[in-house]
Image (cartoon, helix red, strand yellow):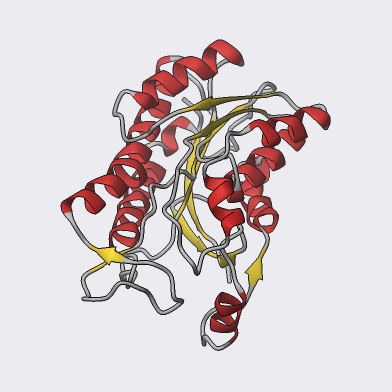
Amino acid sequence: MPDNDSRPESPRHQVALVTGANHGIGAATAKALAAEGIAVVVTYLRVEDPPDPATPEAYRAARRSDAGAVLTEIEAGGGRTVAIEADLADPETPRELFDFAEQQFGPVQILINNATAWRADTFAAKSVDRLGRNVAQMTAASVDEQFSVDARGAALLIAELAARHAQRGAGWGRIVGLTSGGPLGFPEEVSYGAAKAALENYAMSAAFELAPLGITSNVVYPPVTDTGWVTDTVRASVEGHPTLLHVVPPQDVAEVIAYLCSDAAWLITGNVIHLR
């Protein structure tokens, strides 16, 4: 167990587990970490979204894709990576993912909780949101679907990392979660926002409980990120919003995540970092 007053020494051979990394911020993060010489295990789940006239088809295609393109790009740059399709709604999945990662590359030191079971749901009596996208009434199914992945799945992954880390007497680790919405609510995406609020809470608890093991835990709240869903309507909404400043590519968010996983960020823990 490291001295709490000294910088924990990072391992020479680092392994990262990045969930939901077949596209978007997850894919960009996997590439950014691989560029730093970190072996990356990419998880993904192909999702078939129903047609939505306000959502670009390219975004729907990305969500139903595998991780082949991500692996190809990482390997072309000399990086080490492997992918596995995994459903985090299954409580056995976190253990299986860590077993798989250890078989491929060795112990995981870096966990990126990026995967989401996003679907837009609402308490209001309406079928489209303010951007013209489909939205459905909140149901038990919409709550369970999102909490099982964004909250419980993320928590079980943190628990798996912590248990294996402690068992082998490791002294360096990084946890980064991705959030949106949070404690103040997320109108028109109410279950998504609530599940992300739970993820934030788990991550903050991990920051304090796992600090003696040399593990930092933070959450990144990205600005509007163009992972393929951003339309001209969305851009106009951002321009007219008093607190939204940028629409950014996923790579810009990934740079921040990669920094939080570096040795230089050893004092940054227990934060929800809002990017504007």
Q: Quadrant of residue 261?
A: top right
Where residue 104 sits, quadrant-wise, is top right
**Image label count:** 0
Q: Is residue 237 visible?
A: yes
Q: Is residue 83 above or below residue 223?
A: above
Query: Viewer-proximal residue, 86 or 221?
Result: 86
Q: Residue at x 74, y 30 (%)?
A: 72
198 to the left or right of 210: left
Residue at figure coordinates x 76%, y 35% from the top left: 73
Q: Residue at x 61, y 54 (%)?
A: 58
Residue 267 seen in the current view: no
The furthest residue to the top: 103
Q: Looking at the picture, how far across and down is residue 121, in whole percent?
A: 29, 63
Closer to us: 106 or 166:
106
Residue at image coords 64%, 26%: 14
Q: Position of residue 63 (x, y in %)?
A: 53, 46
**Residue at far left of view:** 140
- Spot occupied by residue 214 in the image (x, y as percentages of width and height): 50, 34
- Give above or below for 104 relative to 50: above
- The residue nearer to you, when weighing 48 against 101, is 48
**Left or right: 127 with respect to 116?**
left
Q: Of 2 and 32, which appears nearest the observer?
A: 32
The quadrant of the picture occupied by the C terminus is: bottom right
Picture coordinates of residue 250, whole percent (x, y): 65, 55
